[in-house]
């Protein structure tokens, strides 16, 4: 059985590699990926042959203990929000299901407690992270659609940048014919207008958990994304991959995205930097700045934030691991001969002055 699985995996990789060599227009690639997403979504929905009811206990201000009767495998946190006030539908960006972060459009699988998260919560850290991630995903979608069909564009794995970095980022490799191209201010404004059009459409980010084979099929013509799928599978405890779709754009994400593009308000593409030549071409980093619909900045503050967002954002260094010296027999424990501490001994904090 293991030998059969290995043979199938090798065969599938060869099939994917041969498909990746074929040059397909960007619009056709989007259509193919969206078709794979729709087919798998329909297959999963067809597995639900009868309606089962679940109890969803709402948590949060004004909702404590409210009980909703929903449909297992069909109802989502967004469906629950629609049974509440319109404010919850418009403001909810993410959800907590039994304490676990949950996209607003992912179906609920069992009876649970549900908390709807907004940008004005007392602790919006996770919502802010999801928002920054979503803004980067939106930028990738804009970039993938922005160039003429004769130019290839490959989106790399989006770096997880903290909000405090000043800008969200999308790494990419453009067609070699564009290596000498530097985007002008007008080109950046054009990208910003494209992003604002997607925001006005208020498109949902639909999540779908799939097997690695489905993810590889969706990205059969992108070696970059094939490698990213393998990385995600290696990091996933369940061995599955979560795809997101926004319009006809299918993407991978390092974490949950917010409910919809309409949650973005002020949004601007600020810069594109060269990162140097990699194995498959010139790597670039596109950057942008945004604020959600519930938060606004005065134009003077926005100009300062934008100026900061123009500078190259670099990946934060990995946390340093403090090495502890191994205990050896040569370590001599303190003995009675050790002089006791006296009042003349300076306190610890004075040693650093």
Image: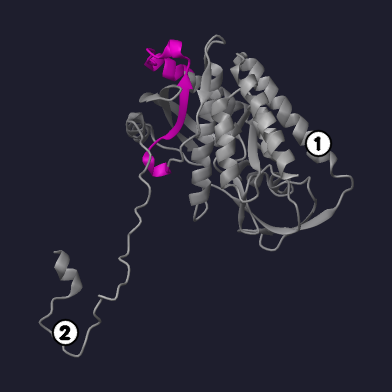
- Identify the secondary structure beneath mark 1: helix
- Identify the secondary structure beneath mark 2: loop
Most distant residue in the right direction:
50
Give the numbered dot on residue 244: none
Give the numbered dot on residue 43: 1
Q: Which residues are magenta?
A: 162-190
Q: Residue at 68% of width from left, 38% of height from top?
A: 6
On screen, 188 above or below 341?
Answer: above
Q: Position of residue 9 (x, y in %)?
A: 68, 35
Left or right of 346 on screen, residue 331: right
Residue 167 belongs to magenta span: yes
Indicate the quadrant where residue 103 lies: top right
| Foreground residue among 152 and 17 | 17
Q: Position of residue 143 (x, y in %)?
A: 51, 22
Indicate the quadrant where residue 215 lies: top right
Whether residue 72 appears in this view of the structure is yes
- Residue placed under numbered mark 2 in the picture: 341
Whether residue 143 appears in this view of the structure is no
Q: Position of residue 353 (x, y in %)?
A: 13, 64
On screen, 25 above or below 106?
Answer: above
- 10 Å crowding of disc 2: few (<14), some (14-19), many (20+): few
Q: Residue at 63% of width from left, 16% of height from top?
A: 27
On screen, 148 above or below 116?
Answer: above
Colour scheme of the picture: one colour
| Foreground residue among 227 and 152 | 227
On screen, 6 above or below 273?
Answer: below
Left or right of 51 on screen, residue 115: left
Q: Residue at 45% of width from left, 14% of height from top?
A: 176
Indicate the quadrant where residue 171 lies: top left
Location of the N terminus by quadrant is: top right
């Amino acid at each position: 059985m293991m030998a059969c699985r290995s043979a199938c995996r090798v065969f599938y990789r060869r099939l994917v590699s041969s498909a990746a060599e074929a040059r397909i227009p960007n619009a056709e690639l989007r259509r193919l990926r969206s078709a794979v997403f729709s087919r798998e979504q329909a297959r999963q929905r067809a597995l639900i042959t009868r309606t089962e009811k679940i109890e969803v206990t709402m948590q949060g201000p004004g909702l404590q203990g409210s009980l909703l009767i929903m449909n297992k495998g069909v109802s989502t946190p967004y469906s629950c929000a629609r049974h509440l006030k319109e404010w919850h539908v418009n403001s909810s960006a993410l959800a907590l299901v039994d304490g676990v972060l949950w996209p607003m459009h992912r179906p609920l699988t069992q009876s649970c407690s549900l908390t709807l998260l907004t940008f004005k919560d007392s602790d919006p850290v996770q919502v802010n992270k999801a928002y920054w991630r979503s803004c980067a995903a939106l930028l990738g979608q804009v970039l993938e659609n922005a160039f003429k069909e004769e130019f290839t564009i490959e989106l790399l794995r989006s770096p997880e940048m903290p909000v405090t970095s000043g800008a969200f980022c999308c790494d990419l490799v453009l067609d070699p014919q564009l290596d000498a191209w530097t985007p002008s201010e007008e080109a950046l404004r054009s990208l910003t207008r494209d992003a604002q059009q997607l925001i006005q459409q208020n498109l949902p980010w639909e999540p779908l958990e799939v097997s690695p084979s489905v993810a590889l099929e969706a990205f059969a013509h992108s070696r970059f994304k094939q490698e990213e799928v393998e990385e995600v599978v290696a990091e996933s405890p369940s061995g599955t991959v979560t795809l997101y779709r926004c319009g006809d754009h299918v993407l991978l994400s390092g974490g949950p995205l917010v409910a919809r593009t309409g949650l973005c308000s002020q949004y601007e593409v600020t810069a594109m930097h060269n990162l140097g030549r990699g194995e498959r071409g010139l790597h670039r980093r596109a950057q942008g700045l945004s604020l959600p619909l519930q938060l606004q900045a005065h134009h003077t503050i926005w100009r300062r934030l934008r100026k900061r967002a123009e500078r190259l954002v670099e990946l934060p260094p990995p946390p340093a691991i403090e090495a502890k010296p191994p205990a050896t027999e040569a370590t001599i424990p303190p003995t009675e001969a050790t002089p006791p501490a006296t009042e003349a001994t300076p306190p610890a904090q004075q040693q650093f002055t």
